[in-house]
Image (cartoon, rainbow, N blue to C red):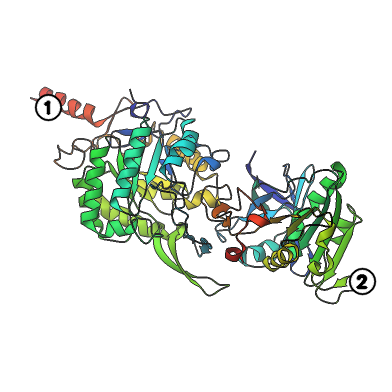
Amino acid sequence: MDRYLMPGKLTGMSTVSLEVRIGDLFLKNPLIAASGTYGPDSFELIPPSLFGAVCTKAVTLNPVEGNKPPRLFEVKGGLINRIGLQNPGVNQFIGDIYPRYCQYDTPVIINVAGFAVNEYLKVLKILEENIKDSVIYELNISCPNVEKGGMAIAQHLPSLKRLLTKAREITNKPLWVKLPPQGDLNKLLKVSEETLVEAVVIANTYRALVIDKETGEIYIGGLSGPAIKHLTLNLVNQARQLTPLPIIGCGGVGDLESLMQYLKLGARAVQLGTSLFSNPDTPSTIISELTNFLNTKNLNSLHDYLHPPGSFKVIDKREKGVGNLQLGSQKSIKGRVFNARNIIRVKEIKSDEDS
Amino acid sequence: MIVYKKASILENTPVGENIFHLSLEFSGWALPGQFYLLKLPFQEPLLARPFSVFELGERSIEFLYQVKGVGTNLLSTMVKREILTLTGPLGNGWPLPEPEKKLALIGGGIGLASLNMLTREINSKNNSKVDLYLGFSKKPFMLESFSKITHRIVVSSEEKNEPFLQGKITEFINPADYDAIYACGPRPMFKALRSMIKNEGNKYNKPIDLLVSLEEKMACGLGSCWGCVVKVKGEYKRVCHDGPVFNAWEVDWDEYS
């Protein structure tokens, strides 16, 4: 059985389960290292084992040089970056970078980017041919720092639809889409649902402008950090009402409070980025605070806190998305988490008993 | 091993115009030329900033900093027993020169912080001959500390500051006397050095190595975010991870300056 699909096995040392489920994938906790902010060179200080999953820096078909510096501007409450997807290309990723992730048990999310739909698809094919582990793919259609591809694909819905449909044909592995914070959220979510992706990541950095104090030059980049948290919370709340797809929140998470805000609004997990820069202890602090919090509430699991017994809501079989594996399809029975398929069966048995 | 640790201030005193000497209670390690990220216990600045290690004691670590922006302004008001957070040691640091080589170390302004441990290390372990050149725009600082570890020291100031030489430090160095030159300072200083040395060997007709320690704005400091890059041999390298010390002949200076 796939190591990521074993409920109850990923709880680690803690007696409290922080396990969350995204589609039919179980993560041992709701923290994910966001793309571009974390990588093998961070492992020594921030081990992957702290996270429910870790996301790689964007991988493109060919090597990308990235933008000419300056690439970073700290602004009030946030950081504007304009890295420009610098990476050595998919082949070197497979040869040199991915193996460094393999030494850990933490699920790996490969962030796939491109400058045209076909490039994304070629990257996926190459990854599929070369990586047999059960990774997750996060399609990055929201990088604000490249002229072609990235956000441009999200702005052209037929292209996005083609990308997601074809991507689904290429792989059976979980496909997540990292949506831009700016754009027609409803349409983006509908396309994501129709094309059977497993989850949406809401959102990427916000396209923002900065004027270099020293030179007077104007630069456009992506804004991240505490400054965007309430903007992205709003997007997650909107998305929750628009789609049954599992949502991963990404924007300004730096403490337990912000994690709980995202979870309360219906996100299944969150991604941490800029907070790893300002405080590398962020994931371990959140995990220990969350564990303490649940202990003081006498709860065995994060799931019990988010879905107190009795609040279980059955969503009947849906035509779109990933069918049964959607909203509310999780239930805690004697402290164990059953996946959606089991729940359906439990429901059927219960109905039989009722009749 | 890279650590992320709290450290309390032992001393934070001005040693020059807008220049402070910061000493923290900290048991750590660092190679000459490596740096730590220092994070203040405030919401702003959001990110930690890189500072070269000036000196390392058994239970202390020392930095020099110049008050430039919001962060260093706040830092300059912090007092004994207040707490900072350190991440490090980071970066590659200076390579020790081959024995018997003749070496010039050039520090421009606050850039001298990177050369203190190196000078001591070479003088105590290595047979290289080291001359130290320190250049200041205003009044020189921290000379006492350097004079304890080397006697071969040339000091200049762009302002008239008796008894020091007046002018830019690059005016007082003869590159041909050396096998290698290590420099840390402002960008114009690197430019001057390069044009002085370019295409010339030393007096033994050997090429002169020029190593420079570069500065860039950083976010992660670990090598993951690719924010602090500089173009080296045609591709962007990370100052925090691949540097901060680079071979000057491989750096694309048109882009850097």
Circle 1/circle 2 CB separation < 8 Å: no
Circle on res. A351? 1
Residue at 72% x, 68% y: name it: B192
| Number of other residues with Cα within 10 Å of mark 1, as a class: few under 14, some 14 to 19, many 20 or more | few
- Using the image as rendered, state which of residue B91 and residue A92 is in the foreground: A92
Q: In which quarter of the image is the N terminus of chain B?
A: top right
Q: What residue type is labelled 2?
A: Pro
| Placement of B191 over or under A274, stated as above or below | below
Query: What chain is tagged by disc 1?
Result: A
Residue pushed farthest left?
A355
The quadrant holding residue A330 is top left
User: To which residue does mark 2 refer?
Assistant: B163
x and y, in percent, of residue A296 in the image: 45, 37
Please say if A187 is above or below A17.
below
Q: What is the residue that sits farthest to the front in this orientation?
A: B205
Residue at coordinates 18% horizontally, 46% vertically from top-left?
A194
Residue A187 showing in the rendered view:
no
Q: Quadrant of the C terminus of chain B?
A: bottom right
Q: What residue is at 37 percent from the left and 33 percent from the top?
A: A130
- Which of the 4 image quadrants contains residue A154? bottom left
Element carrying mark 1: helix
Element under label 2? loop
Return the x and y of residue A315 as percentages of the image width and height. 18, 39
Q: How crowded is mark 2: few (under 14 residues within 10 Å), some or many (20 or more)?
A: few
Spot occupied by residue B28 in the image (x, y as percentages of width and height):
72, 42
Q: Where is residue B34 in the image (x, y as percent from the top left)?
A: 69, 49
Residue A230 appears left or right of A211: left
- Specify whether residue A105 is in view: yes
